[in-house]
Amino acid sequence: MKHLKPLNAKARRIEADLAAMEEDVVALQQAPRPHVPMGCSLSFSPGWEVDASGGTAGLCQPVERDIYDCYVTCFWPVQMADHVNYSPDWASKCAAATKDWRNLDIVFP
Amino acid sequence: MSAPLLHRYRAGEMHRFAAADAEFVYLPTAGAIFALDGATADVLERLQGGAVAHDELAAALVADGMDPADADGLLRELRLVRLIESDQVVSAAPAVDTPPADFPLQALVLNITNQCNLACTYCYEFGADRIATPTGKPKYMTPETARAAVDFLLDGAKGRESVHITFFGGETLMNFRLLRDVVAYADERAAENGRKVTYSLTTNATLLTDEIIDFLADKAIGVTVSIDGPEKLQDARRVYKSGKGSYAVILPRLKALIARHRRRAITARVTLSAGVTDVVGIYRHLKDEIGFHEIGFAPVTSAGEDRDWGLDGDGMGTVLAGFHALAQEWLDHALRGQMHGFSNVSETIGELVAGTNKSHPCGAGIGLLGVSPSGDLSPCHRFTDADDHVLGHVDHGVDHEKRVDFLARGHVGAKYECTSCWARPLCAGGCHHEAFVRYGDTGHANLHYCDWIREWTDRCLGIYGTLAARNPAFLDRFADRKVQS
């Protein structure tokens, strides 16, 4: 806090709560802007693309790899298996995604 | 959190005050106190005329020389602390939540007798405004009931290492033998589980003897004496049944008590009533001539201004003027690093240090219960022996339905007038008993002293601000002060 000085225990708790928010999840458009780039650009992913024929078979990496990236690096829950409740082990055979992606289980909701 | 760039801001709920050439703010939603800088004061000034758009506010700050990023940061800080809020915000209806049914007990007030050797005309237990219905009930608590009460307290205080027992009456010392037995029993029971019981009592001091004083000192029992001041004022209403005053009887006993009992603060508790309003004179006498360590004042409870002891507007005005004079003394002492005995300030400062934000005016019915001589439980000692306010019995515990009803009605969120008052974190509507006597409902806000409470709270905030600026270390002394009623 720069402009308010906490003077009692309750005010100091508010200050601590706000300080904790500074380290919390931030949105890309939030002011002040986060100083690190975030999202898929941090990792090598093909993204949701199509190949030259308009399909996904000829991508340099398979779409399953992208799903796995959502699980590891991003918060994109609709695209990935529910590893909290129903499919905790869906990625347990995939130690290194670039080699083991074929071992990712197919999950049917 | 993304900045709501299109929002218009208005000022949030706050009470601003100035002290020691500085500006402060008290937040009623939290009980928090902050010092403001000039930029914050500037933003708040701009919102005095109504809501202003974010961009307009930011542009005005930049025009005054502030860096654009700093202006955004300032508005964000004020928004998060809720000093400013979007004009689209609709405050949630105040929630009335009751404490969990297994909230651990902390203290019992044992009314070990409902008998008294004095006949103070304003007495809430025996006077015209009494609510007690003692007919046919035991006059003195029996050892069996007292032991059951101690067991009830220790069983109900799960998780607490220390509990408190206050002895009360009637005149407490009319049943001193029981008091002594209770201390022995409670100490023994508590020690079985490595716990501790602390004690206090309230007395009119007429029956103090050397033997009793030695016992109180030996056991470190806190003593509060009900006394109204110098002889003329004490004898105006604190009289024997014959009408004879009690001052001459208690004076030597008080001096002996204060001389020999050095382990706890000896406190005077003054009831201010019609004609007994010379707060400064009473304080001087009790502090300087008799030697009490602390003196607390409270206006008499009365059903209205038709009671001959009730304080009218003039009387309350005189009292408040006296409070201000003693508050100034308190502050002068504090700036020199000295404690002053005017406990009305000390209690409030203790609450402000913590940032107390009360759901209920006091602990009655939550961590504290009263026990009548028959063993009936009540919200506190002021409801002892009143059939309509029984909350259970020490033998079979708390009646949870009645307790929930009492607490739901007494919750500050249930008192409509309090919801817009900045002093509610400390007042919470005021004494349940006072409300019942005055309005017939324990859950009614004590509207007859709202202005008085706000003026007094503002004064204590001013003292707080001055100390925060000039002697902040002094405030640390209040960090552990227990709130006593």
Image (cartoon, grey):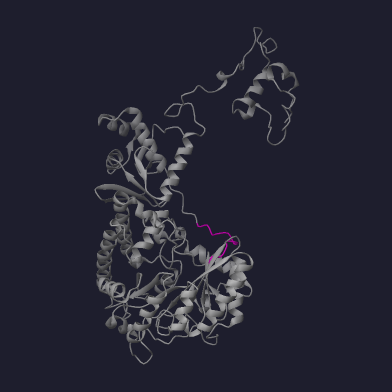
Pick the front one: B393 or B259? B259
Q: Tell me the residue at 32%/32% (across/down).
A: B58
Pick the front one: B312 or B251? B251
Q: Residue B307's x, y, as percent?
A: 33, 80
Q: Quadrant of residue A67?
A: top right
Residue at the extreme top of the image, as rendered = A52
Q: Is residue B25 magenta?
A: no
Residue B95 visible within the image: yes
Q: Residue B451's x, y, as percent?
A: 31, 62
Q: Quadrant of the C terminus of chain A?
A: top right
Q: Tell me the residue at 46%/54% (across/down).
A: B94
Q: Residue B391's x, y, as percent?
A: 56, 72
Magenta stretch in the rendered image = B96-106
Dominant SS of magenta comes to loop
Q: Is residue B99 magenta?
A: yes
Residue B170 visible within the image: no
Q: Tell me the residue at 33%/48% (across/down).
A: B25
- Above or below B334: residue A80: above
Indicate left or right for B265 with B109 as reference: left
- Above or below B470: residue A81: above
Indicate left or right for A91 with B452 as reference: right
Residue at the extreme bottom of the image, as rendered = B242
- Above or below B45: residue B301: below
Q: Residue B482's x, y, as percent?
A: 45, 62
Pick the front one: B257 or B341? B257
Indicate left or right for A25 with B336 as reference: right
Q: Quadrant of residue B436?
A: bottom left
Counting the numbered discs, the total is 0
Q: Quadrant of the N terminus of chain A?
A: top left
